Structure formats: structure tokens, C-alpha cells
Image (spheres, rainbow, N blue to C red):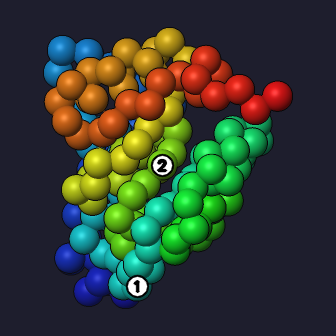
Amino acid sequence: MENDFINWEFIYDTPHKITYNYGKVSPASPVNYRINYIPHVIESDVVVTFGKGEFVKYGESIFNTLPVCEKHILYNVDNLPSYLKGAKRIITVWSQTAREAIALGKIPEVYSANTVDDKICKKLDKKGVLTWKGNMFQEINIY
């Protein structure tokens, strides 16, 4: 097992102690992710992942509007990096998943959930590392 770690690259963030400097925010930060160690890639047209709880409804509403294609909606799966690596299109909320997609060189379509995330997503959208789709509580009406 120790030999496997030699090839892993980490971008590290101290959990729950995050301070954002909007002038210097890095698109792949904060991420705690093994970038170059994805042993199995799952190819698909679209991956939709919005986490758990109330966000799942938003992910489902977006997923249901997608055309017929090879698509996956993911709920807390263990092999999420495999899906992200093989996806042509990623739709998610600003989260660990979005940061992991960016770290993999993807440009995810990202919804935000609060005003702080709105600012981060707007800035990263201008840098071209994600496509901000707006605040999901304002943009999507599922009720």
C-alpha cells in the first residue's frame, strides 16, 4: 500500500477552517483529493450530483430535464472521482465535488446555494474554470 502513495498528489485544505480571499482564490482550492489516482474511469455524457438532503431535489429536477443520453445522477457514491473523470459534462452545486471536477481539468456547470458561494462562483466563472448557472434557490423553482 505504501508504494501506491508515491504517485498520489494532494491539494490539501484544513477542514472547516477556510478563509477565502476573493482576489487570490485558486479554482482548485480547497480540495483534499487524490488527483492522479483514479484506477477506474466511468465514461458518460452527463453526471449530476448535488449531495444529500434538500439539494437532492434540485439535482433531480435538473436531471429530469436532460435529453436521453448516457447520464447518471449520483447520491453519495464511493467512486465519485471515477464518474467525474469520465464525464463529458458535470452539473453540480458549489461543493467538494465542484472543486474536484476543476482539479481534474473539467469545467463543471455549478449552482450556488448562498451569497458567499455566489461571489466565489462569479469570480471563478470569469476565470473560465467553471460555468456558474446561478443561485439554485433563485434560479430553480421545483415547488
State the image coordinates of residue 89 (x, y, percent, origin top left).
Answer: 39, 58
State the image coordinates of residue 143 (x, y, percent, origin top left).
Answer: 82, 28
Point out which mark residue 40 bears: 1
Figure label count: 2
Q: Nearer the viewer, mark 1 or mark 2?
A: 2
Instruction: Judge by depth and name the residue closer to the eye, 73 or 82.
Output: 73
Cα distance, mark 1 to mark 2? 21 Å
| Residue 108 versus residue 83 in the image, above or below | above
- Mark 1 surroundings: few (<14), some (14-19) or many (≥20) residues within 10 A: few
Residue depicted at 18% across the width and 15% down the height? 23
Q: Amino acid at mark 1?
A: His
Instruction: Judge by depth and name the residue closer to the eye, 33 or 27.
Output: 27
Label 1 sits on a secondary structure element that is loop
- Mark 2 surroundings: few (<14), some (14-19) or many (≥20) residues within 10 A: many
Using residue 29 as the reference point, say whether residue 80 is left or right of it.
right
- Considering every residue shown, the one lying at the far front of the view is 67
Residue depicted at 29% across the width and 83% down the height? 4
Q: Quadrant of the N terminus?
A: bottom left
Label 2 sits on a secondary structure element that is strand
Q: Earlier in the sequence, mark 1 or mark 2?
A: 1
State the image coordinates of residue 134 (x, y, percent, origin top left).
Answer: 47, 24
Q: Amino acid at mark 2?
A: Ile
Residue depicted at 50% across the width and 33% down the height? 111
Residue depicted at 52% across the width and 39% down the height? 93
| Residue 38 versus residue 117 in the image, above or below | below
Using residue 19 as the reference point, say whether residue 129 is left or right of it.
left
Instruction: Judge by depth and name the residue closer to the eye, 77 or 50.
Output: 50
Using residue 15 as the reference point, say whether residue 26 is left or right of it.
left
Which residue is the site of mark 2?
91
State the image coordinates of residue 138 (x, y, percent, origin top left).
Answer: 61, 17
- Asked if marks 1 and 2 touch (Cβ < 8 Å), the reply is no
Residue 10 appears in view? no
